[in-house]
Image (spheres, grey):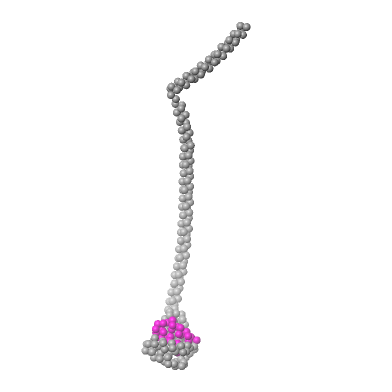
Amino acid sequence: MIAILISVSAWGQVDKKEVRRGNREFRKGEYEAAFQDYLRAVEKDTSSIAANYNMASALYRMEQYDQAQQALDRIKETAPTSASAADYLYNLGDVALQRKDYQAAVKAFGEALILRPDDLEAKENYIYARKMLQNQQQNDQNQNQDQNQDDQNQDQNQDQNQDDQNKDNQDQNHDNDQDQQNDQNKDNQQDDQDQNQDQQQNDKPQNQQNQPQQQEAQITPQAAQQMLQAIQAKEKETQDKVNQKKAAALKSRQKDKNW
């Protein structure tokens, strides 16, 4: 890449002392001092092509490419129509190369070659800028493809994660249902167990009530003898009453018979 050019007095502008002093400092490599002189010239005449053009050259050497672009932009309406338009376009292309604006560099060097077709340096820079632009476009395309692939992978991952989440939710719901069923079975078993215990408790007093009856049925021989004597006495009493009734009836019949 060829270094940026500097103009001395070829612009048809008034040769002011600040510009002349800045040019001397520029040739000595004192670019900061040259910039200060060009800046004072621009402050006096903002439309000065020579002051802005040479300021851009000093800024370029100081590697302040954005500020150099600003200086060239201030004369973009007048410089391309001047006698040294090819030099302006050449320097414009150089600044664009440093700023990695390869499309602007290709355009500037191409226009410079139209004005000066035999400029080999402009042609070399044009070829270089066009190659860099192609590489940049290819890189951008690859990055876009990678980004699209990443977006697609991300979407697939999100879908997969959603599917996994749905499956986890289904499994969780199934586990919850199973737990609820198990709890219900346990509750039912507990209810049955409680009911059996209640039934056993209800049956237990009956058994306990039957036990005294069974115990009462088991009387002693003495008590049985007493009961038997009481029954016999009752039967005897009954028999005596019957016999008395029969005797009375017999007497009645005998009395009737005597009459």
Report x, y in % for residue 199.
Answer: 48, 38
Tell me the quarter of the picture where residue 241 sits.
Answer: top right
**Residue 4 visible within the image:** no
The residue under the point 44% across, 76% down is 136
The residue under the point 47% across, 56% down is 169
Front residue of 78 and 19:
19
Front residue of 37 and 249:
249
Front residue of 25 and 258:
258
In the displayed structure, 82 sits above or below 190; it is: below
The residue under the point 45% across, 73% down is 141
Asked whether 51 falls inside the magenta stretch, the response is yes
Magenta-colored segment: predominant secondary structure: helix
Image quarter hosting the N terminus: bottom left
How many numbered circles does the render carry? 0
Instruction: Report the span colored magenta.
Output: 48-77
Report x, y in % for residue 182.
Answer: 46, 48
Q: Which residue reaches farthest left?
A: 28
Report x, y in % for residue 202.
Answer: 48, 37
Report x, y in % for residue 109.
Answer: 45, 84
The residue under the point 41% across, 90% down is 22
Asked whether 13 falls inside the magenta stretch, the response is no
Image quarter hosting the C terminus: top right
